[in-house]
Amino acid sequence: MLGRPAGVPGRVGGGLREVRGQVGGFYAAVVVRGFRRYATYRTATAAGVFTNSVFGLIVSYSYIALWDQRPHLGGYSQAQALTYVWVGQALLMTMALMGGGFEDELMERIRSGDIAVDLYRPADLQGWWLSADLGRSAFHLLGRGVLPMVCGALVFDLALPSDAVTWLLFLVAVALGAVVSFAVRFLVALSAFWLLDGAGVSQIAWLAGLFFSGMLLPLTVFPGVLGEVARALPWAAMLQVPADVLLGRHRGAGVLTALAFQACWGVVLLAAGRLLQSVAARRVVVQGG
Amino acid sequence: MAEDGTGAAGGDVIELDGVEKVFDVRRKAGVLRRTRHEVRAVDGISFTVPRGEVVGYIGPNGAGKSTTIKMLTGILNPSAGRIRICGIDPARERTRLARRVGVVFGQRTTLWWDLPLRDSYHLVRRMYRIEQERYRRNLEACVELLDLGPLLDVPVRQLSLGQRMRGDIAAALLHDPEVLYLDEPTIGLDVISKTKVRSFLREVNAERGTTVLLTTHDLTDIETLCRRVMVIDHGRLVYDGDLAGLHAVGESERTLVVDFARELPPVEVAGARCVKVEGPRQWLAFPAAASAAPLVAAVADRYPLVDLSVREPAIEDVIARMYGADADRTPTPGT
């Protein structure tokens, strides 16, 4: 389908590179399916674009009121603050900041025992869901991100960069943010192995995400220790960092520091998820039948 | 086709030796107090299955069937004992084993809900690294035998239960597994779908020599597919042998249901006893091993017979009867 040769399956001595290529091919195929599965719901996407745009308008006018009173709040000009709002709308679904990612499904599979199906496959649980969720993220960036952003740019005067490099760095930051977002939600979802009903944990997680990602207000607005802590938590990697990269607030090596911050959280949280997964798999008392 | 002689020594594809699975269950014993209970889901099971055999693995709900299958796939670790599938320890090398076995859980699906069946198969191909040519051949065979042609482009969520099950069975076979575990593959299916699934499984076994372990509550599944039956109860193997032997051991009875022209007192015929009377209808129990023909002839000869049907013993009844006759639950030797 992707036009890649399949090669000889699983033969010992078939070359590590070949095996790696096949593994990559499999996870790439999962990404593509993750994308396509959300692409099948066109009406839902259209409704989502509408919601994001309306939401963006409301928040924009609140921000305008706020920045009129306190110009340069958090170091943003009004145009930058408005850009921040629309980046937030564009990334709301991409980062699944209010839920809507794979985690509900995974928790349901754990609760119902369908997780058994996932566990006996010759595929890695975390890798499988990461691929599927990155496919979803990519779809939501295109389907639910681009149009609201265009809508915002038409209505307001946004501080969007004109150079391709900044946009490219923004996309890298978004990709890293999506990985961090996945890693957090993977941990949340795995809690269902112990709690069976993970609804409480996921509610706390998305409340925390909504606040600490900077979705309500940019984290740069918060003073003192609260601000320091909020900017150091993994949720900052999901919205604050990509938005600041797009707004050009990181200069020179500062951009790399910001991306490294995201990458570090990504690696740490994925490793934690991997650890939790192996513990969970060992104690799995697959529910029912 | 699968006779490449890989793995298993001595032709035994499935080997279990003294396998146990003990769960620690906590129960409420007060507001905050919890007491710990040991539940022995599988309590010392040993058996082997040679290559190419189709075995029925039956028992009442909660007997330990699914737990056994989960241990055979490596999802669950046995608490004690030794398991080898194609010479592989499932718990240690689950992923390596997964490439050589196929699993169908009747009540769960491996298919991707929102996408067409075809897309799920593409993913299976990638996951199991199936060569393009082999994949094409296997998919074609499955599509033909399971009537999947018109369904390939339908999203899985729109499939009926029977269609989905056929789709799942095909998905489990695309990588030419040497062993196939089927956990209630006909549950909830209508008669036509059941027949299709059974004839397909028979064909797969005959053509490819696939070893099949099948759990079911449907006696017809066993009768049409399995020469050998294993019965498990309370985590122990209580019977291992052929189906006829099971009936003999369980002293199972078939039932002849007869409708007479009018209400009659309970009939008396040799070789059967009347167990129930309801208006003009009567239920006559006779040994499962005996032929129904002489009984029917005797009844028709002496009574105004209007209609009749023969009911097979439910597998649960057979098993329940076995326990009644075999209260100390020592394993019964096969015939």
Image (tube, grey):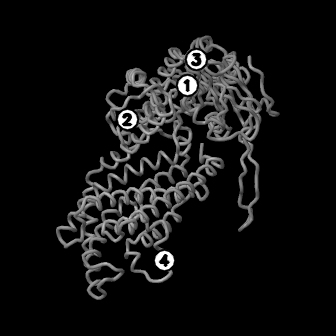
Q: Secondary structure at mark 3?
A: loop
B137, above or below A17, in the image:
above
Q: Going from the N terminus, do you reach mark 2 or mark 1 first? A: 2
Amino acid at pointer 2: Leu
Q: Which residue is mark 1?
A: B221
Q: Which residue is mark 3?
A: B303
Nearer the camera: disc 3 or disc 1:
1
Q: Secondary structure at mark 4?
A: helix
Side (left or right) of B222 relative to A159: right
Amino acid at pointer 4: Glu
Find the distance from the CA under tag 3 to the CA under tag 1.
35 Å
Q: Chain of mark 3?
A: B
Amino acid at pointer 1: Asp
Q: Residues within 10 Å of mark 3 (few under 14, many from 20)?
A: some
Give the percent coordinates (x, y) of residue A152.
Answer: 22, 68
Q: Which residue is mark 4?
A: A228
Which mark is on residue B117?
2
Amino acid at pointer 3: Tyr
Nearer the camera: disc 2 or disc 3:
2
Q: Chain of mark 2?
A: B
Give the percent coordinates (x, y) of residue A230.
Answer: 47, 74
Find the distance from the CA under tag 2 to the CA under tag 1.
26 Å
Q: Going from the N terminus, do you reach mark 3 or mark 1 first? A: 1
- Outermost residue to the right: B328
